[in-house]
Amino acid sequence: MTLDLIADKGIVLLGCGKMGSAMLKGWLDAGLSHDAVTAIDPYPSDWLKDMAAKGLHLNWDLPREPAVCLLAVKPQMMRDALPRLAALGNGPTLFISIAAGTTILTLEDLLGRRTPIVRAMPNTPAAIGRGITALVGNAGVDEDRMALAEALLSGIGRTVRLDGEAQMDAVTALSGSGPAYVFHLIETMEAAGIAEGLPPAIARELAVATVEGAGALAAAADEPPAKLRENVTSPNGTTAAALGVLMDEERGFPPLLRAAIAAARKRSEELSLE
């Protein structure tokens, strides 16, 4: 991470809940000095207070022209929280927002139209450095600023650039909400294993390890997921019997997940209008 780009002027973190804390931990672990960070949080965690004891500026006055302000408050708190940073708008400070449903236009209305803004959508595996974050910038974000945003967010996982903000609702529905879908898959696999006679602890371990291993294999493989599925499906075997249920065109995974992701995308669109 290009920490030298923010070490001199500093970085402001508005909100330090689970996601904000995960990012902050990644920056500090990568070598960013505690005193380069100003965190604004009305209810700081014990961990954040510990970081303040090491030099982090907790609820201090804002630096004059920080390199970056990262907005990590909940979307419904944005309009109340952002005026505190409005004085930094229309200047050189890059604003990065990870608030779901809060559009770039809304942020420009609050901060000024000349403010460089990157909208980003991470997901919860960021808490262990295994997230993926989609990014898109406004007209004020040049290549250097986008690279800076990617460098900061790469501390919590992978990053991808979007072609435009219109894709953000689909990202929210697929990867932003997606971990919950996978957790539910694990939950239902565990319950099914118990129903077939496995002890609960073993059913859970098998379900978690299977999803973890399959995900790692898909990430490492050159072949697409469909080919990996075919590779483990023997004709008339046990996997084929299960897939006959899961791949049913009317009641299986494909129509169910399409409907689920469409519902999440629709809700993301609604949130941006509230």
Image: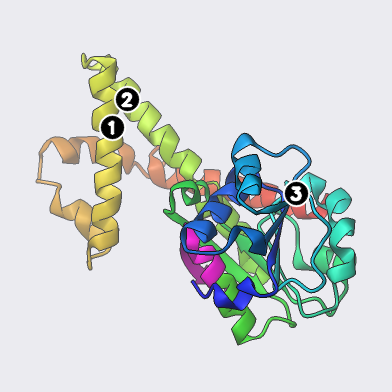
- Across and down, in percent, residue 272 comes to 77, 55
The magenta stretch spans residue 153: yes
Magenta segment: does it hold 228? no
Q: Which circle marks residue 190 in the picture?
A: 2
Classify 226 as above or below 161.
Answer: above
Tell me the mark number nearer the camera, choosing from 2 and 3. 3
Which residue corresponds to mark 1? 207
From the viewer's perspective, tell me whether residue 237 is left or right of residue 217.
Answer: left
Question: Is residue 212 at all visible to an observer of this figure?
Answer: yes
Residue 251 placement, left or right of 203: right
Residue 150 position by quadrant: bottom right
Please report the residue visible at 80 percent of the width from the left and 54 percent of the height from the top.
60
Q: Name which of mark 2 and mark 3 comes first in the sequence.
A: 3
Position above or below: 247 against 190: below
Can you identify the residue that label 3 sits on?
75
Judge from the rendering whether residue 224 lies leftward or rightward of residue 266; answer left or right: left
Say if mark 1 contacts mark 3, CB within 8 Å.
no
What residue is shown at x 25% (from left), y 48% (from top)? 214
Packing grade of label 3 (10 A; few <14, some 14-19, many >=20) is: some
Residue 129, how many percent across, how many down? 44, 53
Indicate whether 106 appears above or below 149: above
Residue type beneath disc 1: Ala
Which residues make up the magenta segment? 151-162
Q: Secondary structure at mark 1?
A: helix
Q: Residue at x 75, y 62 (%)?
A: 103
